[in-house]
Amino acid sequence: MMKITSALLLLLLVLSDCTLAEIVLFDNVNVIPMDREGVLSQHRVLVKDGVIIAIESVSKKLSVDVDVIIEGKGQYLMPGFSDTHYHQSGINQTDFDLQYKLLIANGITNVLCMGELKGQDTIDIRARAGAHNTLAPYYFTTGPMLEKSDLKTPDAAVKTVRFHKARGYDFIKIHSNLSAEVYLALLREAEIAGIAVIGHAQRELPLEYSLRMASIAHMEEFVMVYSDEDNLRIENFDKTLLRQITARVKDSGVYVAPTLSIVKKIQQYSDTAKFERLKNSYESSLLSVEEYEQYTAPGKNYLAPVFSTPKLMNYVENIIHANGKLTLAFYKAGIPLLVGSDNFGLHTAGFSFHDEMEAMNDAGIPAYEILKAATVTSSRYLKRTATAGTITPGKNAELILLAKNPLEDISNTRQVSGVMLKGRWFDKSALQSLLKEVEVERARQRNLQAR
């Protein structure tokens, strides 16, 4: 038998494109495992080749040799976050990579892109993002956002579903109200094809129609089904109506992403002083030139004069109040909630996710339940329960190290000390470098635009 020397072993590994198994130890850390509520104080987590192999008390004798030790004393380790309402901006890889850096620096390891924009190929984007050596979160996508103008007949709906299936999108997203005939044809064909339909509620149809989808984005979609949009009147949602709605939504099994923070943002756009602070904020400096200009030009989007009228601002205030009331009722009823940031406008990717968790907390949802929505529930929704969502043996080491306990204050999710993704560890310095890279590149792009 040939004796394998160290030099020969190294050569064989190089030739076979393999690497020696690396064991990483998170030492003396407080673990928030998310398979139960609570904290495992002074524990260690062992990771081998990017997979969790053990979670144990530091009082137990360490039984394996480790290659890397990450000191976790006084810090909190939890699973990576999933943004289930993410918007991919740009049409080139540079823009994509910049946005990924913002996500990872904020602890987001999974995203669901809610609409393929013109000029994008999210199937290709998903494949590139999913590569083991790519600095990107795990990526899921819908096809193009479907409007009424895209689906004028049942035949068009059937063809659209078959297109989505052939392309390999993860979901079909409805963006506007469809006729009952077209909507039902779309659902039937999607069921045959085995692809889930998600998106906006069908506001012009009874609620039961919308509950046939797999998930509904935006809590105001429920608000509008029961309100009078044309006359800017929002339903009061008394206890009786709340019970009726929550019972029906609960029984349907539909997932709901409230996206509360994007609506709250309107109040900042429409207040001169608040808008100036928003425009000049650090987060806004990380946006592309195109995004920034689109949402800061006079008369555009939420800066349109109509949004400055007292009547409309009162309407927005009523929507925000109703959104909070329904979100709390849905939580209490046990309806599965997701965390989706809807990072449109000056609602910067990554940072907007923490805005959303804080908005859900403001609505009355406890911190643990919000974290569960951002990890466990979203992993189930994205069909990743075998590999993500909890800190348990056999799961991928998609991990966030936080300086402070998020169970005590949900805003502590912003205190990211490190992220592990695809077997790579990014300490605080590395995460700050990612943000700095985005900052520098965006400044360069603005300077070029100004010439």
Image (spheres, rainbow, N blue to C red):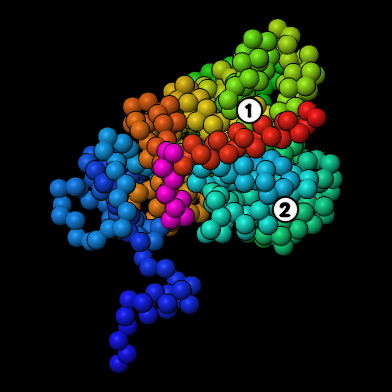
Q: Is residue 268 above or below residue 351?
A: above
**Which image quarter: residue 270?**
top right
- Circle 2/circle 1 CB separation < 8 Å: no
Circle on res. 121: 2
Q: Is residue 277 above or below residue 48?
A: above
Tell me the residue at 56%/31% (across/down).
352
Q: Is the residue marked by circle 1 packed among few (<14), some (14-19), or many (20+) residues within 10 Å?
A: many
Give the mark toward the camera: 2 or 1.
1
Q: Which residue is mark 1?
A: 285
| SS for dot 2 | loop
Residue 439: in magenta span: no
Kind of residue at badge 1: Ser
- Front residue of 137/211: it is 137
Q: Quadrant of the C terminus?
A: top right
Image position, residue 126 (x, y; %): 62, 54
Image position, residue 437 (x, y; %): 58, 39
**Which image quarter: residue 28?**
top left
